[in-house]
Image (cartoon, rainbow, N blue to C red):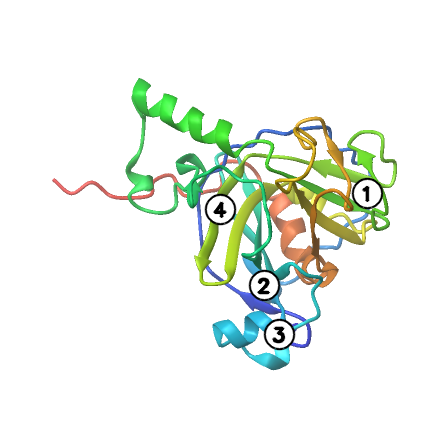
Amino acid sequence: MTFRTSSVLLALGITGAVYLLLGGPINLPEKHPMAQAAPPSSMMETGFSYSTELAAKFGLPAGDAISLQAPMLGAALEIKDGIAGKVCVLHVLYDASIDIRLPEAQSMQALGSNMDVFPNGFLQRPDKDLRKFFAAQVAALSNRAMFRYGKSALEGGATAGDDADASYTSMPLNAYNREFVPGVGWLAMSINCELAAHEDYTHAALYVESNTSANDMILNGHVNPTKMIEFQIPQVLFESMRASLRAAVDEPAGAQRTSKFTVVK
C-alpha cells in the first residue's frame, strides 16, 4: 500500500526512549474507533508529508508534495521503541524566519529521548552529575509546544481540559534546531500514540509560542492560533499511518530490544 499522491512514507528503523511528561489530561473516551491492524506489508515506521517548497530545497519528488499552511514546510510522524512500549514522535520542519520562542541555544537535544543515537546509547546508568544535566535539559525543553487533535479546527482561544471537541498533550521537546539547514528549522515532540490513532479526530495542530506571545500560555494549557504560531499537521499523515499506530498501541510492553550494543572485551 502506498500513498504517493499525498505523502512519502519512509521506513527509518529508529529505536529509542523518550521522557513522557504530560502537560495536561488526554481526554480519550473509554471506547474509541480505530482502524484494524493491517497486514505487515502496510506497516510503516515513519510517514513524511512535505510542501512544494521543501521538495525543491531537499530534492524530493515534486509530484508527492502537498499543500501545507505556512510556516509549515514538512511534517513527519515516527513510531519508535520506548522504555515501556512504542512511542510516537511528531517532527515539524518550518520556515526558519519565524519568531519562535525557544531556548537561546541554536539547537538542543534531550539526550534521554535519543538513546537510539550513539554516543547517547552508551549511557546505561548515568551518575548524579549527568542526571542533573539531563534534568536541566528537560526543564529547558518543557512547555515549548502543545499538540491538539480535534473534531474541528480551532478558531479562537481554548484551554486543555475545557475543549470538548479535542484532546491535548504537551511534553518536553525531544530536540530542536532553529535552522538545521539554511531556511529550515526543525523540532520534534513525542505525542500519545493512542491519541494519534483516534479516528474521530480530523484536525491536528502543534502550537508554539512566539516571542510576542503572552508568557506561559502553554504552561497554563492555553492555546490560541491568533496569538501563537500554529503548525497545521496534514490529516493524511495520520490516516496513512493509522494501521501502524494501532499496532503500536496494541504491542505489549517489553517487546523491544534488550540491548543497544554489545560489549567487546
Between 27 and 36, the one lying in front of the other is: 27
Image coordinates of residue 245 in percent, x first then y, are: 65, 51
| Label whose residue precedes the other's in the sequence (1 or 2) | 1
Snapshot quadrant of residue 236 = bottom right
**Where is mark 3, residue-wise?**
52
Is label 3 or label 1 in front? 3
Snapshot quadrant of residue 45 = bottom right
**Where is mark 1, residue-wise?**
32
Q: What element does badge 3 sit on?
A: helix
The numbered disc on residue 5 is none
The numbered disc on residue 176 is 4
- Distance from the alpha carbon under mark 1 to that under mark 4: 33 Å
| Label whose residue precedes the other's in the sequence (4 or 3) | 3
| Label whose residue precedes the other's in the sequence (3 or 1) | 1
Q: Residues within 10 Å of mark 1 (few under 14, many from 20)?
A: few
Q: Amino acid at mark 4?
A: Tyr
Q: Residues within 10 Å of mark 4 (few under 14, many from 20)?
A: many
- Distance from the alpha carbon under mark 2 to that under mark 4: 17 Å
Q: Amino acid at mark 3?
A: Thr
Q: What residue is rendered at 70% in x and 28% in y? A: 24
**Where is mark 2, residue-wise?**
48
- Distance from the alpha carbon under mark 3 to that under mark 1: 35 Å
Q: What element does badge 2 sit on?
A: strand
Between 18 and 71, the one lying in front of the other is: 71
Residue at the bottom extreme, as displayed: 63
Is label 3 or label 2 in front? 3
Q: What element does badge 1 sit on?
A: loop
Q: What residue is rendered at 59% in x and 61% in y? A: 43
Q: Amino acid at mark 1?
A: His
Is label 2 or label 4 in front? 4
